[in-house]
Image (cartoon, helix red, strand yellow):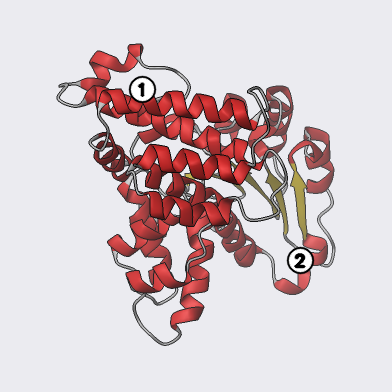
Amino acid sequence: MDTSATPIRTDASVSLFYGDSERLTTRAAQQLIAAQVPPADRDYALVRLRGAEASGERLRQEAASVSLLSPQRVIVVEEADSLPAKVQGEIAAVVSALPAGVAVVFLAGPGRSGRSPLAAALSKAVTKVGQAVDLSPGRGDQVAGALSAEATAQDKRLARPAAQHLLEMVGGDFDAACRELDKLVLYVGDQPEIAAADVELVASASVEGNIFRFADAVGLRDGRQALRLLDDLLPPGSKRGSALGIMGMLARQFRLIWQAQAMRGVRDAKERLADRLPQEHNYFSATGGKSWMQRNLATQAGKWKPEELARGFLLLYETDRRLKGLSDGQIDERLAMELLIGELCR
């Protein structure tokens, strides 16, 4: 989805902005607020409610409190999708009959299959008198396009390959990539384009992104890269148990590689194999709409013979037991992970 082209009515009395990007939904709310409430009036004309703070009665009270100092009032309800269906039904009755000068904005996470994440009664009320806008950055390769559009909005050019690399550095998280993009815009200054080299140099991969990159390095049997990333994930002085989360990510990666390997040469793999794959760490759930991830896993699957994967699962199991103190003797967590990487990547 090209979010920059998504139409947003800033004069709407009721709005729902939803999707899996807090940055995009928050920006839409800010645009509407800027259009309806002057900055000088916002101390008393702008109300923010989060989740359980909202109710039908609370909204009714706020809507009835239009200040004599400002002809307009905007009520923002964050995390609206966390409200019980009964409460959403009560709120629906309020937004269906708002007094003049009052606008309500609901912010919510992604819906299912592009549908509104709110309960049916409130969704219907919103669309009847206002607007419901899905502001998700899209799926798969669309996310890189949305990130490039974010750069364009800041008068910078970010080519798709560089945008895709930035996303991979932060584990595919669009909002995290946008935060890194903001740093890159400052770094390049007057330079019109953010190059891939700038991304590699400046973008500080998040811990989550580092974990994904670490798992990919092991999947590719790149021991040197895996050990380098381990320095960030398990630095000296890490508290005991820190390696267990890394082990969980490695176990997930090996399950995905195993499933990717099982699909090689199988036509209509999703239709033929979907009901035979595990529900946890499921290949189709993990890679849905992410062509770059499908390519990565296919490449990694080619690095392993079936018997090597089986041995890898055994090594993971044995290391996990050592880290949990279930085998003979104690072992330093860092040493255990280094030995595991050495065995897996040889």
* Distance (Cα) linking label 1 and label 2: 61 Å
Query: 189 or 31: which is nearer to us?
Result: 189
Image spot of residue 167 (x, y percent)? 41, 55
Which residue appears farthest toward the bottom when viewing the image? 190
Within 10 angstroms of label 1, few (less than 14), some, or many (20 or more) residues? Answer: few
Examine the rendering and report whether any part of residue 132 can be seen: no
Residue 118 vertical placement versus 107 (above, below) = above
Front residue of this view, candidates 310 and 17? 310
Quadrant in the picture for the C terminus: top left
Image height check: is 217 above or below 126? below
The residue labelled by disc 1 is: 310
- Front of the two marks 1 and 2: 1
The residue at 84%/60% (across/down) is 67
List x then y, in percent, for residue 243: 61, 40
Residue at the spot x=52%, y=72% of the render?
A: 183
* Residue 8 or residue 69, whichever sits in front: 8
- First in sequence, mark 1 or 2: give its number: 2
Q: Position of residue 337 (x, y in %)?
A: 53, 42
Question: Left or right: 43 with respect to 153?
Answer: right
Amino acid carrying label 2: it is Arg
Q: Residue at x 50, y 59 (%)?
A: 205
Q: Judging from the image, what secondary structure is the residue with disc 2 in?
A: helix
Please name the amino acid that badge 1 sits on.
Ala
Say which residue appears at 62% left-offset and 66% top-offset: 34
Q: Quadrant of residue 122?
A: top right
Is residue 76 at least partly visible in the picture?
Answer: yes
Q: Nearer the viewer, residue 217 or 10?
A: 217
Q: Residues within 10 Å of mark 2 (few under 14, many from 20)?
A: some
Contact, CB < 8 Å: mark 1 with mark 2? no
Q: Which residue is mark 2?
A: 42
Secondary structure under tag 1 reads: helix
